Amino acid sequence: MNALFRTRVTAVARVSPGFVRVTVAGPRLHGFRSFGRDQRVKIVVPGDAEPFPDHASGDPVPEPEWRARWRALPPAARPALRTYTVAAARAGELDLDFFVHTSPGPASGWALRAAVGETLLVSGPTVDSGPRGVQWAPEAARRVLIAGDEAAVPAIRGILATLGPEVRARVVVAVEDTADALLDPGAGVEIELVDDLLAALAGERAADYAWVSAETSLVAEARRVLAQVPRVQAQGYWTTGPRAD
């Protein structure tokens, strides 16, 4: 089951030119289950008003309940919902890395002004949950392609930390500033920093499995250029166009 956890910001750091790391903690986060890899959580972007004041006690709220409460709010009063990778998880504490695009969205805009002591509502799996929010699924593949833009870097970092010595990975990341490629290659990993992600992926035939995350329209094209790869897991992490929560 997923639930909404009430957390407090305990640290904010600019870890690279493009990334802001927000660390949150709270006693109820001991009930959060971390799966690593590209695990995603949903955040309720803080706004002018507390969306769920009757849950100020901090008890986790089951997802169907908090979603219903969110939908019941007038549209203009609904806080934005955004999805992020868990950059790191420790007992009672999470790191969330926000990439700040040229035109910051609601979540990265908040991260730029986040302050220690602020409340952040985070929805994720509870300790009794099976794997949730994880799309990395190479199964028996031993030659993998991992690709994305800056927004995918935290997920790529989490995936690389789980690779066994038998896996050979080609990692392709499109970045404007190489300092935002916060990756440790490790054994058996080849990392390419590129300007044009699609051009770098075109003609890929060596991989048995590919994982791609980037801007939504680019991901659709990535599926096309990776037609020779037997299995492709591709998802849009952000979009330049309109979106609905």
Image (spheres, rainbow, N blue to C red):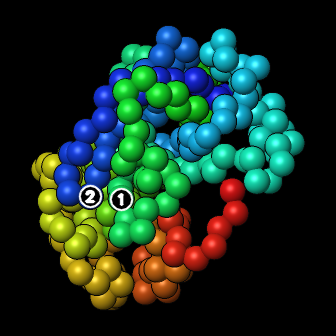
- Quadrant, the N terminus: top right
Q: Across the whole image, how many numbered discs are drawn on residues? A: 2
- Judge whether residue 239 can be spotted in this image: yes
Residue 166 x/y as whole percent: 24, 49
Q: Residue at x 76, y 53 (%)?
A: 76
Precedes in sequence: disc 1 or disc 2: 2
Residue beneath label 2, please?
18
* Label 1 SS: loop
Query: Do the residues bearing badges 1 and 2 touch, measured as CB atoms within 8 Å?
Result: yes
Q: Is residue 218 left or right of residue 154?
A: right
Q: Residue at x 52, y 80 (%)?
A: 217
Q: Residue at x 50, y 65 (%)?
A: 238
Q: Residue at x 82, y 36 (%)?
A: 69
- Judge whether residue 169 can be spotted in this image: no
Residue 9 x/y as whole percent: 41, 27
Q: Nearer the viewer, residue 126 or 10?
A: 10
As shown in the figure, which amino acid type bears the numbered disc 1? Val
Residue 74 x/y as whole percent: 83, 48
Residue 119 sits above or below residue 73 on the image: above
- As drawn, the residue found furthest toward the right would be 72
Label 1, label 2: how far apart the Cα atoms are: 5 Å
Residue beneath label 1, please?
100
